[in-house]
Amino acid sequence: MYNVFLVDDEPFIIEGMRALVPWEDYGLKVVGEASNGSEAIKKLETCHVDILLTDIMMPIMDGLELISTLKERHPNTKYIVLSGYEEFEYVKKGMKLGIENYLLKPVNEQELISTLENSIEKLEKSTKNEEAYTILRDNTIWRCLNQDIDAKEWRERVELYSLEFDGQNLAVVLMQISDGEHENSSFFRKRVEELFQSVCIINPDGELILLVSFNCEDGLKKKLDELNMQFAGYVSGKYHINVGSFVCSTSELYKSYQRAKELSSYRLVLKESGLITDELTKQYTQASLSTSNELDDLKRYIVGSEQEKAFLWIKGAFDEINKSTKKVAPTIIRGFAIEIVTSIQKDVSSHANDQTVGIVKRILEAYSIGILVDILIDFIEGIFRTLEQKSEHQSPIIQSVVQYIQEHFYEELSLKTLSYKFHINSIYLGQLFQKETGLVFSEYINHLRLEKAKQLLRGTHLKAGIIGKQVGYSDSAYFYKQFKKAVGITPSAWRTMNIKS
């Protein structure tokens, strides 16, 4: 589908043009109109056009002046002139400008359609040639940025595609736009190339990559600011423009591209669209993240099947990060999200399939806090579903034993005492318990008691030895030994690190 734009100072002429041609039957779409050349130029700043039909005699800016101005910016657009005057001077000027035809009003339908068909044929031929050239050139640049081309072949391709750069410095600018805007990538690319007079490619992910050369850093900054303003006018969703490091030769462009990709991680913490530069990243701290939401609470909600509380915990933790005045680097926030996943997987791995690799990949690719929250909620929903399925298939006897343990964890418990209570052979009970919970009885009891001990360490001022006895360890030394073995530090050290402020 090719875009058509109509320009005439008489509204009824434009309406007549719209009605005269069955545009869609010819693969055409009228995308806009204007009453004079000046108005047309403004509208065409945010609208890609393949064919422009214009009157000559118009106020403010006439048709030939309009074509002359647009030719510099849009050399591939096809121009058709409509006029009520058959004057040789107008025709001659139009031909010099390379117009497709000069049609007299009232326009003959068949002559106009014939002109449109010729224009479409030229556009298709031009597009095919341009696409073939662009695909080969873009592939060469893409290989260069990914260090997948040797020096000899690169030099040959640089000459073939005229990829020499005039400036002393080079940089890669990576432009990322919201998914819904990817269909406009070709239009954005043309605008970027026009502004910088340089090469811009589209990578397999629909991102735009500009290679820019410059002598003056201030001049580059001015152009980047202008690019940012243009994108603000073009893109309805979010976008980010990541400026890679400055390098001195095309052989080092890959370094600039790698830095631009690293900077793209800051999309996670930026609420607004715009430029992402090394200067901007200096505002963000790499200090460890602390929130008022304790991870043990989340695990307790999961173990207790309190789904809504678990979801609220996730949302609350990241709301706190989002609203914080302290600017936390995205690596730290992603690290916090990964810690949530790995910690839950570690403590409930007996109940849930290992999803860690896939979840971590999604976390590293997330470009907003909202998406990060959705990923974690999806993950926890999966944990709850798995737990529910396990519970449904768990034998009534084990369900009763587990419930009893949860309520009497602080008492002296053993397979022997439980076998008496539930009238089942102790050896069989041990085998059935391990099969259905994934843990041997002693590991299950120890893990539960240590989790309860953490709650008391964080929420009370009781001495560690007393807490050990309250959660079921008759020997304080044994409690200390088990805690340090499982957690890596002593109960007192853990309390100091995790006490609520």
Image: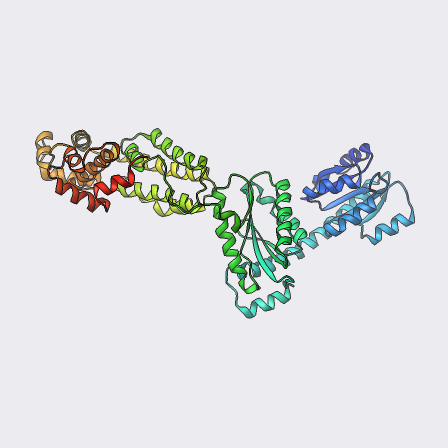
From the viewer's perspective, tell me whether residue 221 is left or right of residue 498.
right
The x and y percentages for residue 432 are: 16, 38
The image quadrant of residue 424 is top left
The x and y percentages for residue 269 are: 47, 42
Q: Considering depth in this image, is 7 or 196 the residue closer to the camera?
A: 196
- Asked whether residue 304 appears in the rendered view, the answer is yes
Residue 237 against residue 281 in the figure, above or below: above
Position of the C terminus, as image quadrant, is top left
Q: Considering depth in this image, is 322 or 202 the residue closer to the camera?
A: 322
Q: Considering depth in this image, is 171 or 200 the residue closer to the camera?
A: 171
Q: Considering depth in this image, is 295 or 499 the residue closer to the camera?
A: 499
Residue 271 against residue 98 in the figure, above or below: above
- Asked whether residue 350 appears in the rendered view, the answer is no
x 64%, y 40%: residue = 233
x 61%, y 65%: residue = 158
The x and y percentages for residue 99 are: 80, 50
